Amino acid sequence: MNLSAEVHDFLLSDVVKRFLKYIQVWTTSDDESSTHPSSSNQVDLGKILIDELKELNLENIILDEFGYVYADLPPSTGLENVHPIGLIAHLDTSNAVSGKNVKPIIHKNYEGGPIQLPNVENLYITLEDAPELEEYIGLDIITSSGDTLLGADDKAGIAEIMTACSIWQKYPEFKHGPITICFTPDEEIGKGTVKIDKERLPKACYTLDGGKMGELEYECFDAWLAQIKFIGLSVHPGHAKNKMINAIHIASRFFSNIPESESPEHTEEREGFFHLSDLKGDEEGATAKLLIRDHDSAKNERRIDYIKSLKDIFEVRYPGLKINLSLLHQYKNMLKYMENDRHVIEIAKKAIEEAGLEVDSPAIRGGTDGARLSEMGIPTPNLFGGGSLFHSRKELIPTLGLLKATEVILNLARIWSEE
């Protein structure tokens, strides 16, 4: 699609403005919470989006009790009977780094070299961090100031969907069939589809939750969460010989038995890993969260068997120690659910190519709401949002990425309307 100068300028201005607005709403999810949504501030962004969707004349607009936002875009005249599609992005940001009081910086006309993030001493984004920076010379790049993440994961996706709706309202020559919009809470803690209303969604959807320009993803990790509790016994350290069972110390030894080569820091592409994301406690008790990830479910089963064997060994090694192991299958590799729905993927490829981009389909080293939706019978590939270094203070996105992702949405809707 060749955008006119007028549409190009409006689209770019609108999507950047929306993105900068959304990232300043604090929406970090809370994996310790038992509520839905896990944090009430996600609803704050949902309320903003509800008002904007009303201004854009969408219909059946709902912010439900669980924090989900739904809306329907009526089709262009004469396209009432074409195949409907859904567009999905998530409201929350990762709790790995603070998402409160994000202060964005637009680095105009990037000239190459490291990008300094001024609020943290000696914090730079380098080519080693993001080799794609070489392709962004001359572009405007948005980052945080360094003391928070940016929030492009996934407020870029939200901004791109909302701007597409704005284009459809302002420029009726952009044709489309029926479209359902859905913004989900708690994706970052693996609960983005727990309370979703499946009946509100069409039989083909797309998440806008991917990375660099051109990415189209339909394979992801098989994902498990191991929650491990070590139950020990505290005794005064001066009289502890053969009596104390130091739970936090034993837990540290336990996790030192996990191969360092199978950690996120030492793996890439299709290599799986263990990831210790939380460990806390004292002599009496310690708790830990261990993420287990691989694209091959059989390899994950072997990792789980290894953790179980460590549990047995440590309970023998430390008489009186009790280890409770709880396993949760968080999501499955979406590939096997997508193989019978190649048409959904092929249309997305065409939409990306028409935006002048080369399609890249890496296996996701993570997951999306699309993984769970595909398992639920709704094929949902993942389209790029345009950003890099997610869950990090070094997160970045070029404004061109925001523009191109929105252009892909417009292409996608038009191509489906021509089916």
Image (cartoon, grey):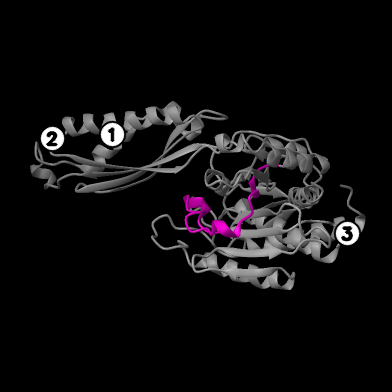
Q: Which residue is mark 2?
A: 319
Tell which of 248 and 415 is nearer to you: 415
Q: Residues within 10 Å of mark 3 (few under 14, many from 20)?
A: few
Compared to 66, does 190 lie above or below? above
Q: Is residue 386 left or right of residue 276?
A: right
Tell which of 367 and 285 is nearer to you: 367
Q: Which residues are magenta?
A: 184-212
Mark 3 in CB contact with mark 1 (< 8 angstroms): no
Residue 186, magenta (yes or no): yes
Q: Residues within 10 Å of mark 2 (few under 14, many from 20)?
A: few
Q: Nearer the viewer, mark 3 or mark 1?
A: 3
What type is the residue that disc 1 sits on?
A: Arg
What type is the residue that disc 3 sits on?
A: Glu
Question: Can I make out residue 91 in this image?
Answer: no
Query: x and y percent of residue 295 in the render?
Result: 51, 32
Badge 2 or badge 1: first in the primary sequence: 1
Residue visible at 82% across and 48% down in the picture: 418
Q: CA distance from mark 2 to mark 1?
A: 15 Å
Badge 2 or badge 3: first in the primary sequence: 3
Badge 3 or badge 1: first in the primary sequence: 3
Q: Which residue is mark 3?
A: 173
Assign a secondary structure to mark 2: loop
Mark 2 in CB contact with mark 1 (< 8 angstroms): no
What type is the residue that disc 2 sits on?
A: Pro
Tell which of 349 and 10 is nearer to you: 349
Q: Is residue 65 left or right of residue 117?
A: left
Q: CA distance from mark 3 to mark 1?
A: 64 Å
Residue visible at 13% across and 35% down in the picture: 319
Query: x and y percent of residue 118 in the render?
Result: 63, 53
